[in-house]
């Protein structure tokens, strides 16, 4: 019994000893970190207002980005929104300490340490993320290397060239530069190995092609600054606009051509089709303009919609000309009736209601009228024929004389062919120009 008690007591004492040693080690490690931090930020050894190696060369700051999301890409305001993790790495000999592990600072704990003052050029809106805590951390290694990581959402200005819209490609860059230090004191540099653009990132209405980086020098009155940038390249998804703009406008043109197969005397039907097509084309053009800034050059979609509107308008004007030709035919019939005797005989009076000019022209009475006119002209003397021709030339207009051989039916048949050929030629030129 006593032997079992001794074993139990020994085991309990061993566990307690292990716990005490662990606590002592934890306390020792915590005290070491605290002492290191105290030595780093003590006023005599470290001044966070002075950059590292102030008497030496420029402090090199290595920048890296991990892109989290891109978009939306706004044509109306010409800007791009992007969310990314920004990493800044630099060397500060004043941060060296004698430990084999790094020290991690949470947000706002590194306020007593010098930090690079990198800012973003052409930035419209930006903010740091603070859910559930500020998304920022800093890590310091024993050799004095420091790394600051922060999560940023940014909206930057992008100058877009929209003359080939929607068959266009765009590029948008994020520019970074030191605000206070010229290139002789701080040297920013992008590290290609620390730039990550995941393949899973999608942008509405665009395909993300790739990215490229670069650097440049900017000269101001007080010195030269070095800037770096990462440029994202996009290709617009034209399929969306084919379904929402090109196909509806094409169907609209085809709808306006339906009037060429409608009887020219059916005025309500042809006018309603033409006016509806014109108003719809005008509305489509205006709605597209509302989503884009005022451009100095016409966009590809503007050219398409303008030509579609012209085709629709010309189809309406074609009916106006066809209607005018019908009026000329009616005038000829009235003159023929007047030459026959001034009154309409019984054969014409018994024609059913709604009889059109085409059906009247095919009647036996109309043929008799034409034959009578020819016979009267042959029997009349030269002076009579001359007087009739002079009177006709005096009253007929220039257009009527030149359209005397053309009828509404012939005009509709010509329009069916001419409009189709013209639209095919336009499509060939349009797509070969903007798709190359």
Image (cartoon, rainbow, N blue to C red):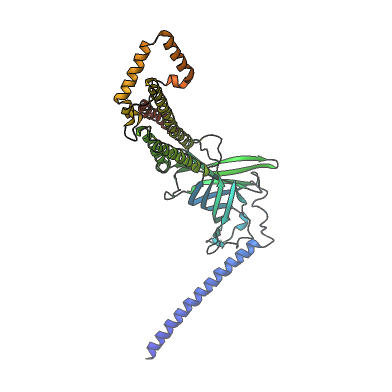
Q: Residue at x 37, y 21 (%)?
A: 340
Q: Position of residue 7 (x, y in %)?
A: 40, 85
* 328 relative position to 230: left or right: left
In front: 255, or 164?
255
* Residue 143 visible at all: no
Q: Residue at x 58, y 67 (%)?
A: 32
Q: Position of residue 273 (x, y in %)?
A: 40, 38
Instruction: Say above or below: 430 vs 245.
Output: above
On the rendered image, what quadrant is the C terminus found in?
Answer: top left
In front: 286, or 44?
286
Report which quarter residue 420 is drawn in: top left
In front: 173, or 103?
173
Report which quarter residue 245 is drawn in: top left
Instruction: Say above or below: 3 vs 187.
Output: below
* Residue 274 visible at all: yes
Q: Position of residue 202 (x, y in %)?
A: 44, 49
Q: Which residue is the extreme one toward the left? A: 364
Count the labels in the image.
0
Q: Position of residue 411 (x, y in %)?
A: 38, 26
Q: Which residue is the extreme one toward the bottom? A: 1
């Amino acid at each position: 019994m006593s032997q079992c008690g001794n074993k139990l007591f020994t085991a309990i004492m061993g566990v307690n000893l292990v716990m005490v040693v662990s606590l002592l080690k934890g306390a020792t490690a915590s005290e070491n970190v605290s002492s290191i931090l105290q030595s780093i930020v003590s006023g005599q050894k470290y001044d966070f207002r002075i950059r590292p190696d102030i008497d030496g060369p420029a402090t090199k700051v290595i920048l890296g980005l991990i892109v989290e999301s891109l978009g939306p890409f706004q044509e109306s305001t010409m800007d791009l929104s992007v969310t990314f993790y920004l990493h800044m790495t630099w060397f500060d000999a004043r941060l060296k300490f004698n430990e084999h592990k790094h020290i991690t600072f949470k947000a706002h704990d590194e306020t007593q340490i010098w930090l690079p003052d990198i800012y973003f050029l052409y930035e419209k809106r930006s903010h740091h993320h603070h859910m559930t805590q500020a998304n920022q951390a800093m890590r310091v290694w024993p050799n004095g290397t420091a790394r600051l990581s922060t999560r940023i959402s940014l909206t930057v200005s992008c100058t877009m060239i929209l003359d080939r819209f929607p068959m266009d490609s765009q590029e948008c860059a994020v520019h970074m530069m030191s605000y206070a230090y010229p290139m002789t004191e701080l040297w920013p540099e992008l590290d290609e190995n620390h730039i990550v653009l995941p393949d899973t990132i999608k942008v509405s209405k665009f395909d993300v092609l790739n990215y490229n980086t670069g650097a440049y020098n900017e000269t101001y009155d007080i010195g030269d600054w070095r800037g770096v940038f990462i440029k994202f390249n996009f290709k617009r998804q034209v399929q969306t606009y084919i379904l929402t703009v090109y196909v509806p406008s094409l169907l609209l043109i085809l709808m306006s051509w339906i009037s060429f197969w409608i009887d020219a005397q059916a005025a309500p039907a042809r006018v309603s089709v033409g006016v509806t097509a014109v108003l719809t084309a005008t509305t489509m053009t205006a709605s597209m303009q509302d989503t884009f800034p005022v451009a100095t050059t016409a966009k590809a979609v503007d050219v398409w919609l303008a030509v579609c509107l012209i085709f629709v308008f010309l189809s309406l004007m074609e009916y106006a000309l066809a209607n005018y030709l019908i009026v000329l035919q009616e005038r000829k019939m009235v003159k023929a009736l007047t030459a026959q005797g001034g009154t309409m005989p019984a054969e014409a009076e018994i024609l059913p209601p709604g009889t059109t000019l085409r059906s009247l022209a095919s009647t036996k009475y109309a043929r008799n009228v034409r034959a009578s006119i020819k016979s009267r002209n042959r029997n009349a003397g030269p002076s009579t024929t001359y007087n009739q021709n002079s009177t006709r030339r005096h009253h007929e207009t220039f257009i009527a004389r030149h359209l005397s051989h053309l009828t509404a039916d012939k005009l509709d048949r010509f329009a069916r062919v001419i409009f189709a050929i013209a639209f095919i030629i336009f499509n060939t030129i349009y797509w070969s120009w903007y798709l190359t």
